[in-house]
């Protein structure tokens, strides 16, 4: 029943109506008897219960009623069945027709697709056509708009020009602008650049404002013209042939054209600098030429050489002047340039001063520079070039002094180094003396020259120098102080004391140079003394003298003590001289000690053979001493001696001293040798301690004596390190005995020498297994033999050396 | 304080003196006098046992070295015999010295003769010494002395005619050398590693830094004649004692400072060089001074021995305040 509900067609409705009409009395009835009747009466409700209905029916009705009821119901059921069947059939019919319709639709749709595609194509083509139309129209529309705008602008421009440039209006508004390129071209042809620039600048605001749009072509053309103009103007600016006026005008015009004038300025400036460079070289030339020139022609030549220089300076000044006019705001730059020029001048001078420059030349160079400065100063009064020049020249003058001092230092050390270079030139005996003298000379002469130079500089009345006077005196004083300090260091360097390893070098290669260095050290010692005692006082004196003559400037310098302290320098050199002397002595003593070391470490002293002659080390020892004597003789002065022969008859001393020694020997002969030894021991106990190492003085004797003492002391120490047999002891006794005489001749302190020689013998006897001294007669004989041999050798050696020298 | 001193060859009887400095430091007392069979050339006392010492002796032609022990004294002063602990008898050439390691107990000894270097191992209980290793210094070098690095038990410095050589005892090879001639004595600075002081005959005293052996870091003028002995103070930095053949003992104060101070600050260096490094010179000796020793217990006291056989004990206390 419910199935029939949804299709609400007429038949169903009719059926429903039928059914409901059939059941209509029941609900009205049941409405009255709700609690009971509703439940069994209404067959159409959901809550219909068949059993209950049956029960009710059975209870209520009788058989007839029941049968009647049954018939009714059967009829109803039959009706319902047919209705149902009808409905089903109708439904089926509808279904079939629907299926047919669908089938038809399907066939129809297949054809429609192609139709739709066709439609799409058509719509597309329509659209593209409409776009084409649109675009073709757009360009024209733009143009029309633009034209419209221009028209409006022109209207405005007309008004503007009428106010700003009455002349331009004369040509008419558009006309002027459009004619501009041609106009400019005409101007270029006639070189009426000023007009051209005026036109262009007049049109400039228009171009600036609207050049992008309306006057593009005009603008381009006129710009090209202007480029030509600027080019021409630049050419004008740089050409030296044009008058300054024209050039200045050109610059002004260029500036008006908004041309980057700075670039031009720089270029022009570079040109100036270049010309300055030319000037520079000339300074060097002049200086060089001056240097070469002889004294007689100096003045003429000076004039001659300064002409080109003056010309170039003048040129430079002219250029500077022009530049100033062209670029009025360029003073600072120009000042800087001129300052550079001055600096470079001085730099060249300083460069030049590295070589030796005489004061006169230096003065002249200064004068030239000063003249230049004066000339430039006229053009550039704001520059205060005077002051700048002072500043720069200070350092130059200062350097001049310092270089002079360093040359002086070099001279002195060169003079000393000549000892190394040419010891053969001069005879061997004198080369040290020569070195000393040349050292002294160069030192003294150099310092005097320097003071003279200073004086020359002070006396000169060049403005520049007048102002520098005080400073110069100070510098020279400070220079002297530094010079002497440097000299001290140089001396130390020359002496080789600073090089600690110098002592350790192998004796073979160092032999020659060492020998020379020994002498050199002595020279240095004496030179130091000379500096202390002569040079410094002389310099001080000269300085004071000068201070007196220039009371205005020099006095101040003199009071201004700390620059130059003669006392301090003296002290330094005094200690230096002592140091060098000690060094010399040490070097010499070292050589002797090496000699002795060889002597004492080589033989086997325990198995020494009987002494036959004086050992040859004695000769070597004496040779060394002779060399010392030689060097000392050249350099040092003779001291005051108590009882000595003069140096001149030194050659005869050996024979002369013979009786002396014999006398001594005879005295020793009288005593028993053994007891003599004992005596020496005892004597030593009671004798006052002999001061062996006394202060060294700057005399020949003192130095020689000290070296001998050191040598003997070394001898003593070497002896103490050995163990001797009797023969060894006797050998030493013999050697020492032989040494006694010559050594005492050489040395001034006989007591100390005696003591030391005795000490050697005592030491030897201490170290001897059997200290029996040599018999005096044998001793005497051997010594005499040796003396004779020595004399012979000396004479032959002397002759051979003279031959060699020839 | 104890110090051994050798009476070298006055007469034919050779003796070893045992000297004690009295407690108040004003008196020297001779505690024992022992005869020694030969002439003594070198004597070193053992750093860890004060009764043991070594000598190098000479019998005129031949040389010998031995380790000795001082016998118990029991009050008597007359010369009892020394007990010989060991004989160092492997040498053939001239023995120069026997070294103990200065910084502590070490049963090794090094003996140096002219040509060879010997490393001995000493067994004092068995009274024997064995050669552990030996190396020749090369025929061209005559060794003359040496010192044992207190900072390195394996390093020895030996002096020869023209240089100071450094030996590694483990491999017995020469490690480096300093070119300096005629060194009499060398002494290591016990406080500072790498610092070595040499005393040369003519050129005075040089202080070396072993890390740069080309140039000495300091030079002291030494003595008027040869500088024979040199000794660094075990306690005070830069305090150096030197004895020379000019019959003087010089006390120097030459602080080596840190290395930078010396190299970089040359200005200050030159200034400090101007300050005289010589603190004092003890000149009341009759003859050359050959022996020097600082007290190990009171480092401001030193003993010196001169040729005439005098031992002088001085205190440097008055000069220490100047530091």
Image: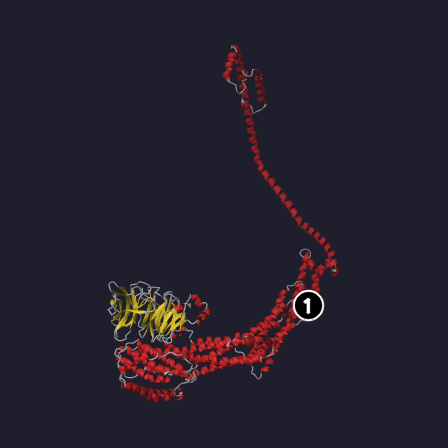
Residue drawn at (42%, 75%) of the image: A497
Q: In the picture provided, is A49 more to the left or to the right than A257?
A: left
Q: Which quadrant of the view contains residue A722?
A: bottom left
Q: Where does the image place residue B185, in percent across and percent down from the top left?
A: 34, 71
Residue A286 visible in the displayed image: no
Q: Is residue A467 left or right of residue B218?
A: right
Question: Mark 1: which secondary structure?
Answer: helix
Report the front residue among A104 and A156. Answer: A156
Question: Where is mark 1, residue-wise?
Answer: A249
Does residue A199 appear anywhere in the picture?
A: yes
Q: In terms of depth relative to the viewer, which is nearer, A5 or B274? A: B274
**Viewport quadrant of the C terminus of chain A:** bottom left
The x, y position of residue A237, in whole percent, is 65, 68
The image's colouring method is secondary structure
Front in this rendered view, residue A645 or A617: A645
Q: Residue at x 58, y 24 (%)?
A: A8
Q: Quadrant of residue A498?
A: bottom left
Position of the N terminus of chain A by quadrant: top right
Left/right placement of residue A331 relative to residue B149 reads right
Residue A433 x %, y %:
44, 83
Q: Few, some or many C-alpha atoms within 10 Å of disc 1 (few <14, some 14-19, many ≥20)?
A: some
Q: Position of residue A330 (x, y in %)?
A: 64, 67
């Amino acid at each position: 029943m419910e199935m029939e509900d949804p299709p609400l067609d007429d038949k169903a409705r009719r059926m429903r109506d039928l059914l409901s009409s059939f059941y209509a009395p029941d609900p009205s009835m049941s409405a009255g008897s709700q609690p009971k009747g509703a439940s069994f009466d209404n067959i159409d409700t959901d809550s219909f219960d068949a059993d209950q209905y049956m029960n009710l029916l059975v209870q209520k009705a009788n058989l007839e009623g029941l049968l009647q009821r049954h018939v009714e119901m059967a009829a109803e059921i039959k009706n319902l069945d047919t209705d149902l069947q009808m409905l089903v059939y109708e439904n089926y019919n509808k279904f079939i027709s629907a299926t047919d319709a669908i089938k038809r639709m399907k066939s129809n749709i297949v054809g429609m697709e192609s139709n739709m595609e066709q439609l799409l194509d058509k719509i597309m083509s329509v659209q593209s056509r409409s776009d084409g139309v649109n675009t073709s129209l757009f360009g024209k529309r733009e143009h029309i708009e633009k034209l419209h705008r221009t028209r409006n602008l022109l209207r405005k421009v007309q008004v503007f020009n009428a106010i700003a440039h009455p002349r331009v209006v004369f040509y008419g508004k558009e006309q002027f602008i459009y004619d501009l390129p041609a106009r400019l071209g005409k101007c270029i042809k006639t070189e009426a650049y000023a007009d051209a620039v005026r036109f262009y600048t007049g049109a400039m605001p228009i171009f600036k404002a609207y050049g992008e749009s309306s006057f593009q072509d005009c603008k381009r053309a006129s710009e090209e013209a202007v480029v030509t103009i600027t080019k021409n103007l630049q050419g004008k600016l740089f050409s030296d042939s044009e008058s300054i006026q024209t050039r200045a005008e050109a610059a002004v015009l260029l500036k008006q054209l908004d041309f980057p004038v700075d670039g031009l300025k720089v270029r022009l400036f570079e040109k100036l600098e270049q010309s300055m460079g030319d000037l520079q070289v000339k300074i060097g030339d002049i200086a060089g030429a001056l240097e070469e020139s002889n004294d007689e022609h100096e003045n003429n030549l000076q004039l001659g050489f300064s002409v080109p220089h003056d010309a170039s300076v003048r040129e430079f000044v002219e250029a500077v002047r022009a530049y100033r006019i062209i670029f009025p705001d360029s003073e600072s730059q120009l000042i800087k340039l001129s300052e550079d020029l001055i600096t470079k001048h001085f730099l060249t001078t300083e460069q030049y001063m590295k070589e030796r420059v005489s004061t006169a030349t230096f003065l002249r160079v200064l004068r030239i520079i000063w003249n230049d400065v004066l000339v430039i100063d006229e053009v550039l009064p704001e520059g205060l070039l005077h002051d700048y020049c002072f500043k720069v020249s200070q350092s130059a003058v200062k350097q001049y002094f310092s270089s002079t001092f360093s040359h002086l230092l070099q001279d002195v050390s060169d003079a000393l180094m000549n000892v190394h270079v040419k010891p053969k030139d001069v005879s061997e005996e004198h080369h040290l003396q020569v070195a000393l003298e040349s050292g002294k000379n160069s030192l003294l002469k150099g310092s005097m020259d320097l003071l003279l130079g200073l004086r020359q500089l002070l006396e000169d009345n060049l403005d520049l120098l007048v102002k520098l006077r005080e400073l110069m005196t100070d510098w020279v004083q400070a220079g002297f102080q530094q010079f002497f300090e440097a000299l001290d260091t140089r001396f130390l360097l020359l002496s080789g004391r600073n090089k600690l390893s110098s002592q350790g070098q192998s004796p073979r290669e160092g032999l020659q140079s060492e020998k020379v260095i020994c002498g050199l050290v002595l020279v240095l010692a004496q030179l130091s003394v000379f500096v202390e005692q002569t040079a410094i006082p002389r310099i001080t004196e000269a300085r004071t003298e000068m201070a007196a003559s220039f009371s205005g400037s020099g006095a101040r310098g003199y009071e201004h003590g700390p620059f130059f302290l003669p006392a301090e320098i003296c002290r330094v050199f005094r200690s230096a001289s002592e140091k060098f002397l000690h060094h010399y002595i040490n070097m010499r003593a070292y050589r002797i000690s090496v000699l002795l070391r060889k002597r004492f470490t080589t033989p086997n002293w325990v198995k020494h053979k009987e002494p036959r002659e004086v050992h040859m080390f004695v000769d070597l020892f004496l040779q060394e001493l002779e060399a010392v004597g030689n060097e000392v003789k050249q350099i040092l002065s003779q001291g005051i001696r108590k009882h000595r022969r003069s140096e001149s008859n030194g050659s005869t001393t050996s024979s002369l001293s013979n009786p002396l020694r014999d006398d001594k020997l005879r005295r020793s002969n009288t005593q028993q040798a053994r007891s003599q030894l004992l005596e020496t021991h005892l004597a030593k106990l009671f004798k006052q301690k002999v001061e062996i190492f006394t202060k060294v003085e700057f005399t020949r004797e003192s130095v020689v004596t000290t070296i001998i003492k050191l040598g003997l002391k070394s001898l003593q120490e070497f002896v103490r390190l050995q163990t001797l047999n009797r023969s060894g002891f006797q050998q030493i006794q013999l050697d020492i005995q032989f040494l006694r005489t010559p050594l005492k001749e050489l040395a001034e302190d006989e007591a100390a020498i005696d003591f030391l020689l005795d000490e050697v013998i005592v030491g030897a006897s201490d170290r001897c297994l059997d200290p029996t001294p040599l018999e005096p007669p044998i001793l005497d004989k051997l010594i005499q033999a040796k003396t004779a041999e020595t004399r012979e050798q000396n004479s032959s050696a002397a002759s051979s050396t003279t031959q060699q020298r020839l | 304080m104890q110090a051994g001193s050798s009476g070298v060859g006055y007469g034919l009887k050779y003796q070893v003196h045992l000297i004690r400095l009295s407690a108040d430091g004003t008196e020297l007392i001779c505690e024992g006098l022992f005869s020694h069979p030969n002439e003594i050339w070198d004597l070193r006392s053992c750093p860890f046992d004060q009764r043991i010492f070594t000598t190098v002796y000479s019998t005129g032609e031949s040389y010998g070295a031995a380790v000795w022990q001082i016998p118990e004294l029991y009050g008597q002063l007359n010369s009892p015999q020394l007990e010989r602990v060991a004989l160092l008898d492997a040498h053939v050439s001239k023995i120069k010295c026997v070294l103990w390691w200065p910084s502590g107990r070490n049963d090794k000894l090094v003996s140096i003769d002219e040509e060879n270097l010997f490393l001995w191992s000493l067994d004092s209980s068995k009274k024997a010494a064995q050669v552990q290793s030996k190396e020749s210094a090369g025929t061209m070098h005559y060794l003359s002395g040496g010192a044992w690095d207190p900072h390195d038990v394996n390093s020895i410095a030996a002096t020869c005619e023209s240089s100071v050589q450094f030996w590694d005892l483990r491999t017995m090879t020469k490690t480096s050398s300093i070119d300096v001639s005629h060194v009499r004595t060398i002494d290591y600075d016990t406080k500072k590693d790498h610092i070595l002081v040499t005393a040369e005959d003519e050129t005075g005293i040089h202080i070396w830094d072993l890390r740069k052996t080309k140039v000495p870091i300091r030079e002291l003028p030494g003595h008027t004649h040869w500088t024979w002995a040199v000794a660094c103070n075990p306690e005070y930095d830069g305090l150096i004692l030197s004895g020379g053949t000019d019959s003087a003992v010089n006390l120097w104060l030459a602080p080596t400072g840190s290395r930078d101070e010396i190299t970089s600050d040359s200005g200050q260096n030159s200034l400090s060089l101007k300050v005289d490094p010589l603190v004092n010179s003890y000149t009341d000796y009759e003859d050359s001074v050959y022996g020097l020793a600082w007290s190990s217990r009171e480092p401001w006291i030193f003993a010196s021995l001169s040729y005439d056989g005098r031992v002088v004990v001085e205190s440097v206390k008055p000069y220490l305040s100047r530091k």
